[in-house]
């Protein structure tokens, strides 16, 4: 395998959709659920952070964290001293997790309070996070995590050295039990409410970025890289 | 109690900070943790959705959902047919949950891949979600959920009728075991990396909204309300 070839899942990329399971078929809003692989990837790739859920002492814990995707695998990382990473690394069978990514695209204002909603795209991944121990997979995983936020950045920074690698735990979560859920469009008001004197529609939400702020100690001769240009 | 008075917690609003617990003191990055009540409230109030974690069949589940805050109580709602709401409503002792809100404020680019980070503000709430059954508390909770996204909107829409109220479950989560975590500032590069030829600094992320998009069936005579003005 060439160094830049991403690790793949179990050949799942040959199908267009994930297979629904009892956990990925919602009890409500089934018409909004999707198992389309391309949609799932696009929602994941647009995110800066995910929310990672796990169980500690019988209770749920949800923490935001950086992540990266290579093909059909997600990676998260953290200090070898962090609790979830220690627990996942404690051996078989790994750490049961739920990894969720959400984009809120608009606020949906209906005439009735009841039909207020949001337009959103979310992906929910169920599975078991496993420690990544192979040096090559750890290396490409860490690059993917850096590139998730700023594509191209991993090639324009100093790679982790031996000491930093030793301090970093990497977990892998295969994209296997996965669903997306998407809401678009305007409010779904009741016909009997349409004549009420309340404004109804969508307030689109936007995301962007400001001008890059150089570090105080940055040599002014270092130019702003192309990958930070307005997008 | 007048109708507009918010339910309060247990008099906790008289102290400036939440009391740290074993669950709210992080093993890593303690210097970023805060228990300041005003900070916690401000992070919560700026969010459109939270990520709600609970345990189902021993495994974690994390779902995005709307929420609202009244004083020291958070509220979430959903269909009476949804699984977590059914489970919480099944009686004592309620549903153990972790409710997390995250804002990503900037991407932190260091010379080293290892020191890449994000500037963020997050709040993590641990506790037990309990069903809200009192009609008055349900009413103000539902208003708070609508007003969380668009302050003032609940007064400018049709309130839920009897049938809608019967279809809606409301859960309450007291702000008791709570922490915030905040990262600000530039990258924390190693002194030995400062002369490397890589750009370093912060890419600030911004959020905003576009022009309100009226519903196709909206009477053009209905004006855009003031609370949708640019903000």
Image: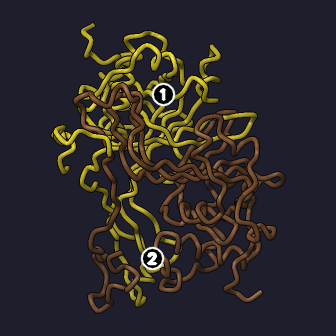
Chain colours: A yellow, B brown
**Above or below: residue A95 compared with residue A3:** below
Query: Circle 1: is it few (<14), some (14-19), or many (20+) Cα within 10 Å?
Result: many
Tell me how many marks there are: 2
Q: Nearer the viewer, residue B185 or B80?
A: B185
Q: Is residue B78 visible?
A: no
At 24% from the left and 25% from the top, the residue drawn is A155
Give B83 or B54, whichever is nearer the viewer. Answer: B54
Q: Which image quadrant: the N terminus of chain A?
A: top left
Q: State how far apart marks 1 and 2 are (Cα).
A: 47 Å
Residue B105 appearing in the image: yes
Question: Which residue is the extreme one toward the right?
Answer: B92
From the image, tell me which residue sits under label 1. Answer: A77
| Quarter of the rendering containing residue B56 | top right
| Relative to B51, B199 lies left or right | left
Parent chain of label 1? A
Looking at the image, residue B57 lies above or below residue B228: above
Mark 2, Cα crowd under 10 Å, few <14 / some 14-19 / many 20+, is few
Q: Earlier in the sequence, mark 1 or mark 2?
A: 1
Where does residue B14 sit, x and y in percent of width and height? 76, 71
Tell me which chain the residue with mark 2 is part of: A
Is residue A196 shown left or right of residue A71? right
Which quadrant of the view contains residue A83? Answer: top right
What residue sits 61% from the left and 47% below the top? B33
**To which residue does mark 2 refer?**
A190
Where is residue B229? Give x, y as percent. 34, 80
Q: Quadrant of residue B216?
A: bottom left
Residue B120, percent from left and from top: 46, 50
* SS at mark 2 in the image: loop
Which residue is found at the position 59% from the left and 73% from the top?
B144
Tell me residue A136's x, y (percent).
37, 11
Name the residue rendered at 64%, 78% in the picture: B162
């Amino acid at each position: 395998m060439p160094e830049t070839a991403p690790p793949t899942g179990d050949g799942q990329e040959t199908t267009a959709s994930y297979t629904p399971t009892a956990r990925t078929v919602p009890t409500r809003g089934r018409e909004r659920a999707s198992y389309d692989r391309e949609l799932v990837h696009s929602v994941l790739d647009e995110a800066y952070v995910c929310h990672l859920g796990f169980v500690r002492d019988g209770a749920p814990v949800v923490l935001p964290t950086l992540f990266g995707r290579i093909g059909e695998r997600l990676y998260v990382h953290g200090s070898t001293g962090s609790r979830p990473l220690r627990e996942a690394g404690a051996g078989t069978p790994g750490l049961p997790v739920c990894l969720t990514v959400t984009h809120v695209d608009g606020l949906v204002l209906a005439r009735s309070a009841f039909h207020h909603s949001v337009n959103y795209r979310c992906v929910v991944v169920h599975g078991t996070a496993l420690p990544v121990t192979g040096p090559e997979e750890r290396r490409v995983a860490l690059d993917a995590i850096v590139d998730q936020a700023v594509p191209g950045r991993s090639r324009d920074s100093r790679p982790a050295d031996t000491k930093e690698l030793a301090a970093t735990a990497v977990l892998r979560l295969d994209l296997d039990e996965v669903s997306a859920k998407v809401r678009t469009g305007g409010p779904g008001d009741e016909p009997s409410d349409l004549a009420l004197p309340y404004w109804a529609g969508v307030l689109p939400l936007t995301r962007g970025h400001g001008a890059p702020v150089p570090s105080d100690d940055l040599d002014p001769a270092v130019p702003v890289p192309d990958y930070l240009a307005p997008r």
